[in-house]
Image: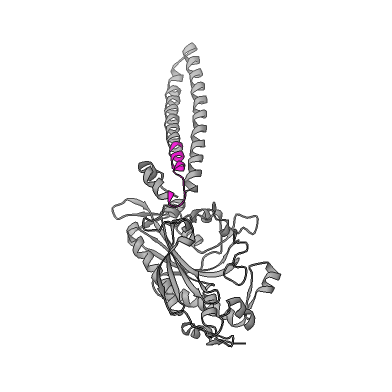
Amino acid sequence: MLDIKAIRENPEDFKRRLARKGIEGSMIDELLGLDEKRRETIAASETLKAEQNEASKKIPQLEGEEKAQLLAQMKEISERKKIVETERDEAEKNCQDILQSLPNTPHDEAPNGKDDTENKVIKTWGEKPNFSFPPKEHWELGELLGILDLERGAKVSGARFYYLRNQLAILQQALIFWAFTEVAKKGYSATIPPFMTRSEAIYGTGYLERNENYIVNPGEDDLYLIGTSEVPMMSYHAGDILEEKDLPLKFVAYSPCFRREAGSYGKDTKGILRVHQFEKVEMVMLALPEMNEALHEEIRGIEEELLQKLEIPYQVVDVCCGDLGNSASKKYDLEAWLPGQDQYREMTSTSICNDWQTRRLNIRVRRENGELVYAQALNGTAVSSRPLIAILENFQQEDGSVLIPEILRPFCGFDKIAV
């Protein structure tokens, strides 16, 4: 959530920055009008309350007509106070509704653009494999090798579900465990969080209002399956006051992830690129504003290092304003080369979220001088199930077999998947 005080002090700057995410400046004008109304009615309510208190002190000292007049006056004050408080509550609610609907402001360095077609490639790494045969897509390889069963996944659970079988099931566990331990070695606190959270946690990370893709509520209780471990990890310190000397706090969390994939009808229906269930290792940080840039590059560096050790060609994309989403002010996507699709596709991402999430979750930091400020939030994916796709497609052989990246062979116990 944005800071209403900061908006009040510099509305034109917020209009300029939010316009880059497609937000009309009229929303800021409406917000400030409601904020002014809210503050006016708060002041009026306090004035009427003071008049009530003053009158209450005088009543025991009066008799007869004077007492009756004052009682009538108190009744009138009480009725006016109720009206003012109703106006105050309405203005407060409307003000909060707009504040909660506003996305984070984009970083000045984030590229302009309306959607992912305007993202900016800033780096490429690795040599694309040069096949002497037409490369297959991962789902074709999976079916050929008997390691991916999409048909039975759909039969049992519906579209976008699947069975990983035999060596591919082992390969996924090897990939997840390897990445989890690699990041933990770098000083990140290894964590397995709850896989379901209350709605407050989803609201706090910004997924409740606008992104039903991340909201899967399987029952009547106020519990939701998580779409990313960012949700429970950000809420780990909800309501806490952290000490400056302890920052940054770095976590690496494993979880399964569940998503509706709302709005993706007809997209990536083959294979496991866009599915309802997958596994992921996520990095989450709490920091101070002056740490944001360096930590964002650190997370990106870890993501690149993991893909390089897996020997997967990739490109780094600086995400444009229109594709940043609700919470991010700056974001990098790492896209792996998929020879079967003949294109780069997203594998991981990393975002700076500033204090947009921590205001919602009330996570503050006590500076060494005693000042309380909101913490800064960052996140980034180490690996998910998606690198399985890149491994299958980049390491495929002409006979349909697939080599295992050397870094994962000790974790798998085999160096090749063959019929």
State the predominant SS element of the stretch in magenta: helix
> Up-down: is 99 above or below 249?
above
**Which residue is more in the foreground, 191 or 164?**
164
Q: Residue at x 36, y 60 (%)?
A: 292
| Rendered location of residue 78, percent (x, y) | 50, 25
**Which residue is more in the foreground, 193 or 398?**
398
| Rendered location of residue 69, percent (x, y) | 49, 15
**Which residue is more in the foreground, 225 or 398?**
398
Residue placed furthest toward the left? 369
| Rendered location of residue 122, percent (x, y) | 39, 67
Q: Residue at x 45, y 32 (%)?
A: 41
Magenta-drawn stretch contains 27: yes
Residue placed furthest toward the right? 155
| Rendered location of residue 84, percent (x, y) | 49, 29
Magenta range is: 19-33
Q: Residue at x 49, y 47 (%)?
A: 100
Magenta-drawn stretch contains 225: no
> Up-down: is 235 above or below 145?
above
**Which residue is more in the foreground, 72 or 120?**
120
Q: Is residue 239 visible?
A: no
